[in-house]
Amino acid sequence: MATTATLPVTGRVDAGLPVHLATHKSGGRDRWSPPLAELPGDPTAAVEAALNEVLDPEIPISLVELGLVYAVAWEAGVARVDLTYTATACPCMEFIREDVTDRLEREPWIDRVELVEVWSPPWTTDRITAAGRAKLRHLGVST
Amino acid sequence: MRQFTDEELKEKVQGGYIVESVDEMTDGYRKALVVQLTVQADTELMSAPAYWMAARHAPSTNTQVSAHAIIQDELAHANIAYRLLEDLGESKEHLVYGRQPHEFKHPYGFDQPLENWAELVVANGFFDRAGITLLSDVYQNTSYGPLKRALVKVDMEETFHLRHGEVWMRRLAKAGGEAREMLQRAVDWMFPMTVEWFGLPDAMKRHSGQLDYRLKGLTNDQLRQVWMSSTVPLCEQLELKAPAHWDAERDAYVLDYPFPCRYDEEVKRWLFEEGEISWDDVFERWKARGPMNETYVESVQRSRSDVARWLGGGAAA
């Protein structure tokens, strides 16, 4: 697919970045859905759906598709996310924490985000979902 | 025998033709591509020792890991570009290990010492942004197929470096005090350094063929504008002083200092007060290379010969 927007759009920090790179750099922020106005019927599913919009900082698939999210829960305004990283020395841990928190805190029915980092079981490529695999194949990355 | 004359090839690539092999190239095309790839490879390679020496100033183990991940990416990007040069008949061995420091073609900005964490993160925010500006233009416009495909991964990884730079610039700006002072001092010398990196203004540009062969899409001045259109708003957002502003009448970013001008390497300061100099003066400074040129090149080349000697004269793998 052809990319667009090479010439500057003034006054924007990501001006000049091709669209796919701007999306990638921001953890997918430009494609995040608007927040839900009220508490959804199944808040846990809604938290997971929101996380599925957060892109990994290195590979342009979502954290859910990459298999980094181990468990999701919502109770009384607190969204709890159990997640891992692809390596204990992952250079992007801070970016991932920031992206997850920013995405979930957009929702008015989430007052607080609790991130629990999990190292067991360790992440392997087996955890990449079928949807994630299909996207990676499209990008020329074999799993 | 060549498939196309130079004029035929120029016309074909302007119409969207993608070159896949050396057989399709003319001498002019091949030479222009070799120059472009050499600059690209050398820039990636020389950013590694510059960032590596600066990574010593990382404030924690995690930030060390992030800084070294960037260095690893840069080495891999250099490797990709030298590998493409081999397809064109150039020798990677010679390019990396056989040249004198002053023969490398990276920009003068990567001949400078990065001496603290603020300078490293501004290098990520400014220099890597320049890299993305240049390389994403190449990605979108190049007529050379193998380079276009290779750049998908390179550009994605460069955005990680840029984000690292921006996140840390934001953090230092917010902290105020000494952190903000160090940040501003880095911006003061690194902003004009990057502006100069984009080279001769279009009005003075000697004909290079890069646009005719469609090896890139935008001119030097257009690329400089793309870079400023992101960098100036970033500085404004962080309340950092940057010597450029948006001029609505001219519909462009305009520099607030004489360009080009002299640079004092010792104190890392642009001598705005001395006024404009000629581009010949700039080329002379670039040609003489900057203060860390020999140190950086030596750090890349040194162990090659040491280990080769241990192995009894055979080349290291």
Image (tube, rainbow, N blue to C red):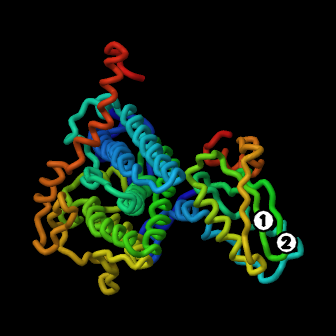
Name the residue furthest right. A41
Q: Residue at x 68, y 57 (%)?
A: A62
Q: Is residue A125 above or below residue B285?
A: above
Kindly indicate the quadrant of the structure image that contains residue B205.
bottom left
Q: Which one is nearer the viewer's eye here, A120 or B240? A: A120
Q: Which residue is mark 2?
A: A75
* Label 2: few (<14), some (14–19) or many (≥20) C-alpha neighbours in 10 Å: few
Q: Secondary structure at mark 2?
A: strand
Q: Could you tell me the amino acid type at mark 1?
A: Arg
Q: Which mark is residue B172?
A: none
Q: Are marks 2 and 1 in contact (CB under 8 Å)?
A: yes
Q: Which one is nearer the viewer's eye here, B110 or A15? A: B110
Sooner in the amino-acid sequence: mark 2 or mark 1 = 2
Q: Residue at x 42, y 75 (%)?
A: B176
Horizontal side of A44 relative to A124 (left or right) equals right
Q: Residue at x 35, y 58 (%)?
A: B116
Q: Which mark is residue A80?
A: 1
Horizontal and vertical percent position of residue A24: 57, 60
* Label 1: few (<14), some (14–19) or many (≥20) C-alpha neighbours in 10 Å: some
Residue A54 visible in the snapshot: yes
Q: Chain of mark 2?
A: A
Name the residue furthest bottom. B249
Quadrant, the N terminus of chain B: top left
